Amino acid sequence: MSLMPRIPNISKTIGFKIAAAYSLLLTFSFVGLNVFAYLFLETTLARQSRRMIAGEVESLQEQYRIGGRAAFDHKALENDSLRKNNPFFTRAISSPRRPGRVFFPQYWKDFDLTALEDFPGQTADQWISFPNRDHTYALEIYTAGHSDGTLFQVGISTEDRLAILRRYKESFLVVSAPLILLAVGGGAFLSRRALRPLRNLIETVVSIEAGKMDARVPVSRTGDELDELGRLFNRMIEKINQLIQGMRASLDSVAHDLRTPMTHFRNIAETALQQEQSLPAFREALQECMDESDRILRMLHMLMDISEAQAGTMRLDIKPMDLVPVAESMADMYRYVGEERGIRIETHLPPDAMLEADADRIGQALANLLDNAVKFTPPEGLVRVIIHKEPDHILMQVSDSGAGIPSEEIHRIWDRLFRGAQATHQGLGLGLSMVKAVVEAHEGEIRAQSTPGVGSIFTVQLPRRHHR
């Protein structure tokens, strides 16, 4: 069963409109070109006929001037022997009162030559068109005069010219039918070929609508606009898929990891209810419930931030910023925490470190790294914050002299809610996941190196320019 939706009215489809427009354009172009050619041929043949007539008149006039009427008659008879297929109509009129002599009247039986006497245009330098009895063709006649008053009339029948034009029209009609069929077929083929990416797009959308989220638009790599549309659509579907997978993973993680705090929450309330009804006990239970609810809310907020960052939808306020003041501020804040345990925090910072980033998010990531470093560094230990400037990026390192991370766990420290087997500090297990998500949202990278018993080094590489 085809997934293509049925389109009830084919005349409304883009393919039909393109094919019809192409066919009409080609047909009208062909008809227009042939009409122009026909008119050009007609004009050319008429002009050629008139030039021939004018040339014949000039030749007869020259003979008449040289040898009189006898030379004129001889020339007219001679020309007849040379033009058997399309003879000249020749007549000489000596006086308006006497009908002129028509040479070879047998050629002009289709014309009522007696009516020619009353036909207008019997003066010198005049053109007349004299129709035959059936009015199917005509004689084109030119009248020229001589100084002695004699008029010479020379003409050519338009029968041959009309026959040529008629054959041209017949050829046009014969060629038109296959050409129109070719135009329609070519239009249908081109429209189908041109709209194939759109049909693929429609089929993909229908497949996705039917639940096949792995469906993608075939890309032809032609480099045209429709090909680019297919690639953009596929990227959009990939993005949507990532969002859906991220949402599912987040919901699964939340559903799984909320069981422990919610169970603890319930146990606190249940224990309070089972104890003696004393106000201090209830107050203590309520305080524990509030602390647990705060912990759950922090977990939810961090999980959602991580999911948004991994899906590429984390809202970042990208602006030019100096990383040095942010690092100094975070280091000063954790110095107070470290002093209580005898932990020193040193900073090795350049005068400035400019980049394009979200200052709040970068501060949040640095705070998580410092928080972990202080937590896992023993008393009298050392935590360092170092910033290096490179031409295209900035390196920020946070190192500690703590217990280190076992090699079998270092690849899992970025997982959400992961806590190492030797972890003794209370936490959500989301700090490093949050740091990695923020760094990658800034198109950066983060790496971890650790030697058990010596300490760990976390290196953040951030580009100076944000390209999204």
Image (spheres, rainbow, N blue to C red):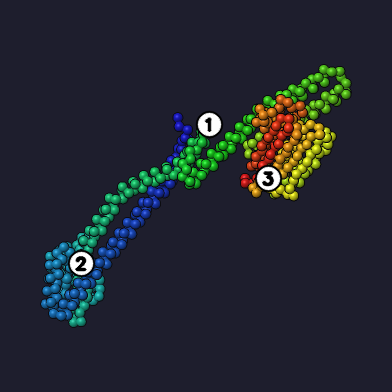
For label 3, the SS is strand
Query: Gap between marks 1 and 3, in whole Å?
Result: 43 Å
Indicate the quadrant containing the N terminus: top left, top right, bottom left or bottom right.
top left
Give the x, y percent position of residue 416.
Answer: 68, 30
Say which of 32 and 288 sits in front: 288
- The residue sitting at the bottom extreme is 148
Query: Gap between marks 3 and 2, in whole Å?
Result: 96 Å
Q: Is residue 105 above or below residue 412?
A: below
Sequence-first disc among 2 and 1 = 2
Q: Are marks 3 and 2 in contact (CB under 8 Å)?
A: no
Q: Is residue 350 above or below residue 274?
A: below
Give the x, y percent position of residue 58.
Answer: 21, 75
Q: Which amino acid type is marked by label 2?
A: Ile
Q: Is residue 191 left or right of residue 429?
A: left
* Mark 3 crowd level (few <14, some 14–19, many ≥20, 10 Å Cα): some
* Mark 1 crowd level (few <14, some 14–19, many ≥20, 10 Å Cα): few
> Which residue occupies 73% across, 30% down?
453
Residue 170 visible in the displayed image: yes
Q: Disc 1 designates what residue? A: 212
Query: Gap between marks 2 and 1, in whole Å?
Result: 81 Å
Sequence-first disc among 3 and 2 = 2
| Tag in front: 1 or 3 | 3
Q: Disc 2 designates what residue? A: 156
Q: Disc 3 designates what residue? A: 394
* Mark 2 crowd level (few <14, some 14–19, many ≥20, 10 Å Cα): many
Q: Is residue 398 above or below residue 42?
A: above
Give the x, y percent position of residue 341.
Answer: 83, 33
